[in-house]
Amino acid sequence: RRQRVAYSALLPIATGGLPALMQFMELPTPQNLAFALYPLVGCSATIPLLWAYNGGRGRSMKWFFYAYYPAHIAVLGLAKGLLLGDWNIAVTG
């Protein structure tokens, strides 16, 4: 079971993170670094969380996630503005 979880998390690392990391090595810009770090760090960080899952339902954290989701989007927007200097809000229509 653990091996299957690791393989599913390693797929985005191999297909997205490593090519982006190679592109960052060729042209080191903040944009290329962001595209490399997202799959490398994000997908790698999920592996221990998925391994810790025991198949049972945990305590209800409904209100935590109601607060967490908009807060983490705001933090990502702030990081985008500070790293890339792009303070525009993406609006899709």
Image (cartoon, rainbow, N blue to C red):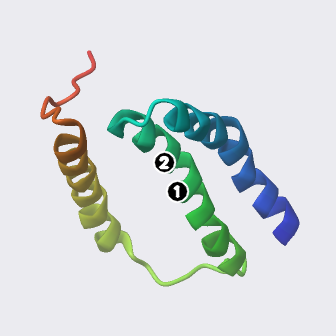
Residue farthest to the front?
Answer: 26
Q: Amino acid at mark 2?
A: Tyr
Residue farthest to the top?
Answer: 93
Drawn side of residue 5 relative to residue 18, left or right: right
| Residue at image location 66% in from the left, 47% down from the top | 13
Return the x and y of residue 43 as percentages of the image width and height: 59, 55
Location of mark 2 (residue): 38
Return the x and y of residue 83 as percentages of the image width and height: 24, 44
Q: Is residue 50 above or below residue 37?
A: below
Drawn side of residue 45 relative to residue 50, left or right: left
Return the x and y of residue 39 as percentages of the image width and height: 56, 47
Q: Is residue 82 above or below residue 67?
A: above
Q: On residue 20, which mark appears?
A: none
The part of the image, by quadrant, that contains residue 70 is bottom left
Residue farthest to the left?
Answer: 87
Return the x and y of residue 45 as percentages of the image width and height: 56, 66
Drawn side of residue 68 relative to residue 39, left or right: left
| Residue at image location 54% in from the left, 38% down from the top | 25
Circle 2 sits in a helix, a strand or a loop, which is it?
A: helix
Q: On residue 42, which mark appears?
A: 1
The part of the image, by quadrant, that contains residue 66 is bottom left
In front of the other: 86 or 46: 86
Q: Amino acid at mark 1?
A: Gly
Q: Quadrant location of the N terminus?
A: bottom right
Asked if the residue at tag 2 contacts the one at tag 1, i.e. Cβ–Cβ closer than 8 Å, the answer is yes
| Residue at image location 43% in from the left, 42% down from the top | 33
Q: Residues within 10 Å of mark 1 (few under 14, many from 20)?
A: some
